[in-house]
Amino acid sequence: MLRAIRHKNILPAFSAFRAFSSSAKEMTVREALNSALDEEMSADPKVFLMGEEVGEYQGAYKITKGLLDKYGPERVLDTPITEEMALICLLNILQAGFTGIGVGAAYYGLRPVVEFMTFNFSMQAIDHIINSAAKSNYMSAGQISVPIVFRGPNGAAAGVGAQHSQCYAAWYASCPGLKVLSPYSSEDARGLLKAAIRDPDPVVFLENELLYGESFPVSAEVLDSSFCLPIGKAKIEREGKDVTITAFSKMVGYALKAAEILAKEGISAEVINLRSIRPLDRSTINASVRKTNRLVTVEEGFPQHGVGAEICTSVIEESFGYLDAPVERIAGADVPMPYAANLERMAVPQVEDIVRAAKRACYRSVPLAATA
Amino acid sequence: MSLSATKFVHPITAPPSTRSSDKPLFSTFFGSNHTKLRFNKPIVAAQRRSSSAASTSSPVVAVSDVVKEKKLKSASNLLITKEEGLVLYEDMILGRFFEDMCAQMYYRGKMFGFVHLYNGQEAVSTGFIKFLKKEDYVVSTYRDHVHALSKGVPAREVMSELFGKATGCCRGQGGSMHMFSKQHNLLGGFAFIGEGIPVATGAAFSSKYRREVLKEPGADEVTLAFFGDGTCNNGQFYECLNMAALWKLPIVFVVENNLWAIGMSHLRATSDPQIWKKGPAFGMPGIHVDGMDVLKVREVAKEAIERARRGEGPTLVECETYRFRGHSLADPDELRDPAEKAHYAGRDPITALKKYLFDNKLASEQELKAIDKKIEELLDEAVEFADESPLPPRSQLLENVFADPKGFGIGPDGKYRCEDPKFTQGTAHV
């Protein structure tokens, strides 16, 4: 069903028109990431992968499938806890070590791509991501740059509980010195990962586990081995004129579905896929709000100090006079993720929440009291 | 994991007395055989400090003794030539005088923030770093001024960095604890303890990668990671020992065990205070050396660095040393026993080297005084340079956050935006 919606409604605003003919190739996000890694590793011998289970296990989520066979164990490094994968608690243990090693290797011109099994485990290594990767270029006054990519699934999966479901976009995006990217479709995944690997700065690449298996149509341009998306530019997934909905990662899919539902009720929603959380594409967001005069931000993470908070403030600072309604912010519930399926559904934004918020912004419904 | 021959041997059966007095050239360097030093709590410190660890099963033998036995058979009994001796002396004097000057400048208000001085530990820095090539890497902690100087960063640049001026080695953006120099391959300068160890392991990994995967000829750079005794209780240290031994990385882990982590005594904090033992647990040699004696440190350093360069893997070296000043210039240093401080002041590495040079007629009083004077003048000039240097301009605030600040990665002409000659200009307007 998702595929059908996308075929009809996607018109990228600023890039060349792409014909979604019936013979368009489809690619899953997993294949997109795998092909991006493959191409970048073959183009530049300094690129290497490091992480838990990336080698012999073919990747915890099979993103790095086939790469060990193709490039050998010197370029696809399983970090030492491989044999202990059965003990879930020990999976976290060696995070700090191999992240710092990745940073040290990056100091000297190698281009490591460090995989975290999920970004929750990156908290063990966050000292190295922030203090040695993000701040090094500044502390050394430009002498030492760190061309490293930290990638892995971020945000909630299905029923994995509180310690495996947090979204880290806001945490990393608040730190100067890091670039934070979050792809949605296969095109995003390919283009942004290639740009991240080629970028001379530390990049935190937030994927989403539930999107890995989803497939999206890709054009021939996307399949080209030098295809790259610019870092710091958002994409307008769907044009509209009544309300702007910003989202990233899995929430883009929900926002598009919500836009479909709103269209039936006569509200034309413009959906922006942020793609880049840091640097945030404030100009695209503001231009859109100046056109539609209403804003709804959607994210999966915790509401306080989140990505939506930053977008709302940016719009209020720059386009206050253009707003016709208060800005609406949709985020995950302000609780650690519960395990029970119905509670989990309530803790993550759903399509109905986005529809409701958009209608509130358009003064089409009775305003609800904000939930705690 | 094969160890190189006889050099790193901990003979179980050798009696304790082989260590001390029957080697005339070295007896003064051993210091006294004091076994009891008082600390806050009456812990059995004896075994830690006594040279042969009478209560442990495997006494430690100074490597220099092993080497010395071999050398006694050769023509010259001396471990260093005159030129080498003067180089060592000059480097240690530079370190000592520089740190003393830092203290002066701090109390005059020219330097600020956190300043951690290295007085007393110069033998470790000089002993190890003077064996490195320019391309070899050094990673240090917040006590990094002297490592920077030994590695070749000019004193005036380090002084300016400490004053926070634009002419510092990091343009004033790093400060005392974050000395970086790409030209001299000094990779910092880290405030968190243990933070530099994985970074050093990564640098060693990169030289191995360049040699084996990228097939660059001559990529045999060795990395030295310096850190303290407190760090040896930190998880990252063990993770890196494991990975370095597993991947046989060209790295030497140098523990500057000065017995104190700010005010926490090593013996109170550590279940097994003999850090060198942790090396063999991970499959690498663990060596204990007297860090107040630059010649002994040199012998161990030579072997460890050459081992790494040959590709035989990492080594853990524990240098028993002491810092004469407090943890930082803000530390009142009240917890350490004055008797302990006096004991180590008597083992001052500079005094010891001086005595060795005189006793073996390698240098005269005048030559050493000339070096002292030269270093004093160098430092006066460095302070003057730092004083007169300008503060960083306002526009520098937003520079250097990214190597590619426009953030788009690839420009319209297909090249990286960071290749644009104007890339150091920030994108925001202040």
Image (cartoon, grey):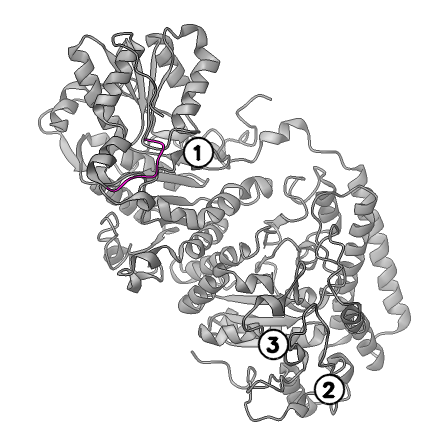
Chain name for mark 3: B
Residue A247, percent across and down?
Answer: 31, 25
Furthest toward the right, the residue is B366
User: Quadrant location of the N terminus of chain A?
Assistant: top left
Residue at the location (30% across, 49% down)?
A42
> Are tags 3 and 1 found on a single chain?
no
Q: Is mark 3 on a helix, strand or loop?
A: strand
Circle 2 or circle 3, nearest the eye = 3
Residue B314, percent across and down?
Answer: 49, 70
Residue B378, percent across and down?
Answer: 82, 53
Chain name for mark 2: B
Q: What residue type is labelled 3?
A: His
Q: Report the residue marked by disc 2.
A: B76
Q: Is residue B148 visible?
A: yes
Disc 3 versus disc 1: distance between alpha carbons? 45 Å
Pointer 3 local density, CA inside 10 Å: few below 14, some 14–19, many at least 20: many
Q: What element carries label 2?
A: loop
Disc 2 versus disc 3: distance between alpha carbons? 26 Å
Q: Does the magenta stretch include residue A334?
A: yes
Furthest toward the left, the residue is A22
Q: In the rendered view, does A182 fall on the left or right side of B159?
A: left
Q: Which of marks 2 and 3 is nearer the N terminus?
A: 2
- The quadrant in which residue A230 appears is top left
Q: In the rendered view, does B363 fall on the left or right side of A25?
A: right
Q: What residue type is labelled 1?
A: Ala
Towards the viewer: A279 or B127: A279
User: Quadrant location of the C terminus of chain A?
Assistant: top left
Q: Residue A173 carries which label?
A: 1
Residue at the location (46% across, 62% down)?
B240
Q: Is residue A13 magenta?
A: no
Range shown magenta: A333-339
